Amino acid sequence: MQPLSRQFKKNVAKSIADKELQKSLLTAKKCLVHNRLNAIKLVTDFELLREKGKQIKQHTLSHLDYYLEEFEKNFTAQGGQLHWAKDASEARKIIVDICKHHDAKTVVKGKSMVGEEIGINEALEEAGVEPIETDLGEYIVQLANEAPSHIIVPCVHKTRQQIIDLFSKHHKKYGCDKKLTEVSELVAEARKIMRTKFLNADVGITGANFLVAETGSTVVVTNEGNGDLCSTLPKVHIVTAGLEKIVPGLDDVSLLVRLLGRSATGQEITAYTSFFTGPKRDVDLDGPEEMHMVLIDNGRTDLLNSELNEMLRCIRCGACLNHCPVYGSIGGHAYGWVYPGPMGAVLTPAILGLEEAGDLPNACTLNGRCESVCPVKIPLPKLLRSLRVRQFKKNQGSKTSRFALKIWAQFAKHPKAYHWASNTGIYLLSLITARKGSIKFLPLARGWTSSRNFPAPQGKTFQSLWLEQKEKKCE
């Protein structure tokens, strides 16, 4: 996927004006937030689970070299072939070479964000290999020639009518002439088409939710079972994963799976949680004849050695996206690359650089909802502030914003001047908006007033009101 993060502001304007997108985002957000809330209510120790999940991931990151070596030893002992990829280019070459070696014509793929990150579909197509997305959401966005807009619900931006039209257009070549409208019918049609793809595929590619160091196993979590079919039906199974997916043992997977399902979709556990430990043995009835593991760095080592290393705890649940007011207003495509939302606002600049994605950390309101729902307690607001500090020190970003920050900093160093300016500004705004209750245009806030009215302040700052309350109590 070609990064378009530099066009973030243009993407935002386009997304906010898209009425169909706004409807889809609102519906999905309500559902996912509601489901998560109900799921965690059933667990009396959910906060304890979060803390333990954080400790497992942070411990692994602190001893990453040890656990990577242990995984390599145990994975190869089970008959797997492990490949190290320092960047996206090297990962693509490894995967394409494996496919060429087996004269592969078609590849069935399970949903994988790291696959999107390294751009494997484009590389396969250039090599004359047809990649087929088998996750229903990924399949829909592939038909639309689009990228996923959510890490858990790839086609969250699509309405039912848009999906109906896509199926009607692309499924005629399979003899499906009837235009279906019911969800169950659409799913059944996709399943019928996909079964032939599974049976005829030369290679299967999946991601991995977890890599277990003590057994050399890869763990895939899905709700459709397509991950199992991609892994067992083709003769060759290729797993792609970032270095950070390693966990020490099976007990750790058990705990993290409990966190993942509840945080992602509001389920106690996903429908399929599958463990793959090496290729097919002589006594096995099914499974691949070869199993390859492509472990990808692509900037993760640099991230590990920086102040942003806590981001590597991420288990890709999507909870931060579901609760983010910014993502809920603009969707995933506005972020311009693979990872959207708060986690993407950290990962994208960390991997691609602030020069490419400098607007993303500044899009956050720092309201903290992402941190409060993260199953492994990643302090996303703190990490976003760290990126802003980096940007400021490097004199990156717009001159206007840097100038405004310097002015604000001077006021912040002098509390009396700061309070006077704040009180004066609030008072003047309250006078301007007193009659209408809001204002449609502010010279320095066009980004706000272009899509919504600015509400009238009540005439006093929060601190002024707090001081008044304090004085009354003292009386």
Image (cartoon, rainbow, N blue to C red):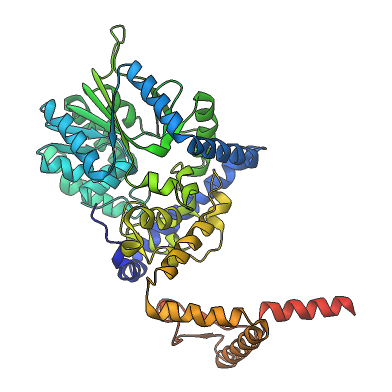
* Residue 333, quarter of the rendered image: bottom left
- Inspect this view and state whether residue 271 appears: no
Query: Above or below — where is 336 with respect to 281?
Result: below
- Residue 57 x, y percent position in the rendering: 51, 38
- Residue 461 x, y percent position in the rendering: 66, 81
Q: Residue at x 53, y 49 (%)?
A: 378
- Inspect this view and state whether residue 185 appears: yes
Near-viewer residue (365 or 195) = 365
Query: Above or below — where is 68 with respect to 266?
Result: above
* Residue 409, quarter of the rendered image: bottom right
- Residue 425 x, y percent position in the rendering: 58, 88
- Residue 40 x, y percent position in the rendering: 60, 42
Q: Residue at x 36, y 52 (%)?
A: 339
Q: Residue at x 51, y 42 (%)?
A: 266
* Residue 466, quarter of the rendered image: bottom right
Count of labels in the image: 0
Q: Residue at x 37, y 69 (%)?
A: 16
Near-viewer residue (280 or 184) = 280
In the image, taking residue 412 as reference, residue 274 lies left or right, namely left
